[in-house]
Structures are given as C-alpha cells and as structure tokens.
Image: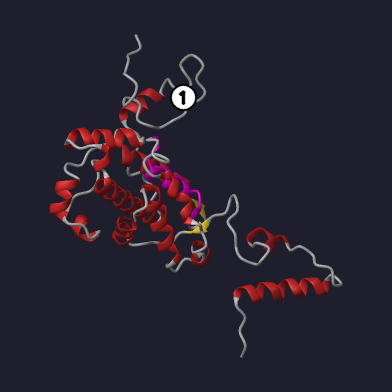
Amino acid sequence: MKTLNRRQAINRIIGISSVAAGGALVANPVIAAVTSSTGDWKLEVGTRLAYVKLDPMTVAKLAYETGNGCMFQVFDSIIQSLAASNSPDAEKFAQVPTAMAHYGYAGMLGEGTVCGNINATGMLVNLLSINGESANSILNPTMRYYESAELPLQTAEFIEGIGADMAETKDQVGTPTSANSIMCHSSISLWARENGKSFSQKGMRCKQLSASIVYELVTMLNNAFDGETENPHPISDTVAGCQTCHTSESTFQPSVKTNMACDTCHTGHFVN
C-alpha cells in the first residue's frame, strides 16, 4: 500500500480543491494559516503549540551543553526537547527557528539590559499552550525566581545532573548570588563583586545560571500541566507595598506598570 508524506498529502488536498472548483485553485483558509507556499508549516502570530511534560534535569543538562549565550541556551533546549517529545505538535516544534534567540546573550548583544534567560522565557511561553490554555502566566514567577533566588544552583545533585564538575564550579563560579533585578548588568555585577571576579570571567557561571533557570522553568511548566495553579514565586512584600499606591491607573502617584523588584533602583519612602 502506497503512503503519502505530509507534503504530498497537502498537495493532494489542494489538488482535490482545485478540481472541485472547476480547475481554478481556491485558497484554503485553514491550510493558508498553517503552511507556506511550499506546503511547509510556518509560525504565525498567535500560534501556540502544545506543551507536554519534560524531565527538568535532562533539559537543564541540554541547556548547559548548548552554549551560544543564555537566551539561546534556554529557548533552544526546551524547544528541541519538545521537538523530540510526544507532543502532538512535535513536528512543528522541530521547525521553530531557535537561532533567532542568539541575539539575547549578555543582555541583548552585550548591552547588559534584560537578561537573556528572561527574554527567552517570554518568547517561549508566548508560543506554548498548556492543556489548551496560554502559558503566559509562567513568565511572572520565572522573573521573581530570577530576581530572588541565589543562583546558579550548586547542590551536588544539580551539578552532577548537568554534567559539571563541583571543584571547577567552586573555582570558576564561586558563591551563588541573587540578581535583585531581571537586568543582566545587575545579575553579573553583584556576582562579580561577591566573588572578586570580572564580567569577562562569567562563562561557566552564566551557563550554569541558564541551566538553573531551565530546571525551574520546566518544573513550573510541568506543574501547570498537572493543574497546579499556585504561584511558587510571588511578588515580594516590598513590591506589593509599592503597588498599593503606584498602579497603572494612578494619577495622584507616578503611574507604574511592573512587577519588577522596586528597591534595586528606587529608595523606599513612607507616606505621612
């Protein structure tokens, strides 16, 4: 029995549509929305692909081995893992051009702005659906985790799991630190000051940081897939306090729309 590959099947469908229309090719809106002119699937604005549970340590190890900057490490490792998974959209994940995430290294082309780990998370969750629902809500706790946790992870289990050496880690990474911000420059500067190192020595530290973020991110995605709705990394009490006055609708106080850590850059104050 002769079988058709995916492209042949699509061409057959288009051919049938043409015959039905009296020989004139009629654009099929369903096919047009998900395929290119050659019959290949293409990513469109608003597209969401189905997430399935992954093993956090396996993906973290892949991220650590991937390299090419933090944003690429995070985005590529998870997309490639989903491409190899039992997701109904695995073939589509395999066609996502992950190379586009390379620009995010060192805070976008070395500018020290938003960390590539966060940039990658935003791009990733905007692409995912979890049991048919948007995965966007995972970005917030990932940001809060990045701000507050002492990273990279340095438990013996984690270091062994990603295939790193503990002695080498202690020498090149030193003491884990909290970024207190989602900015690359804050994250690296605080780490460098704590460990007596320079920006140029960040290589292993940042690779392990990305692996740490991937581990936590996949864990949260898995929990969401299992129906857990509790936010494991809520905003801090400081931010919650600031938001009582500084809201996106405020007119009597400076109007603010963010959940980022406030006191990293702004001093606190009291209202009499």
The quarter of the displayed image where residue 234 is located: top left
Compared to residue 236, the image places residue 99 above or below, namely: below
Single out the residue that lies furthest toward the bottom.
Answer: 1
**Which residue occupies 32% across, 41% down?**
146
In the rendered image, residue 120 lying in the magenta stretch gets the answer yes
Q: For this view, does 100 lie left or right of residue 204?
A: right
Closer to us: 113 or 141: 113
Q: Which residue is mark 1?
A: 256
Q: For this view, does 200 lie left or right of residue 35?
A: left
**Which residue occupies 38% across, 58% down?**
77
**Which residue occupies 36% across, 49% down?**
69
Q: How many marks?
A: 1
**Which residue occupies 79% across, 65% down?**
26
Q: Is residue 135 visible?
A: no
Span of residues in magenta: 113-130
Single out the residue that lies furthest toward the right.
Answer: 22
Q: Is residue 204 visible?
A: yes
Residue 139, horizontal then vertical, whole percent: 42, 44
Residue 42, horizontal then vertical, whole percent: 59, 59
Residue 38, horizontal then vertical, whole percent: 66, 66
Compared to residue 218, the image places residue 255 above or below, namely: above
Single out the residue that lies furthest toward the front.
Answer: 200
Single out the residue that lies furthest toward the top.
Answer: 272
Quick one: SS at disc 1? loop
Badge 1 density bin: few <14, some 14–19, many ≥20, Cα 10 Å: some
Residue type at numbered disc 1: Val
The quarter of the picture where the N terminus appears is: bottom right
In the rendered image, residue 137 lying in the magenta stretch gets the answer no
The quarter of the displayed image where residue 8 is located: bottom right
Residue 73, horizontal then vertical, whole percent: 37, 53
The quarter of the picture where the C terminus appears is: top left
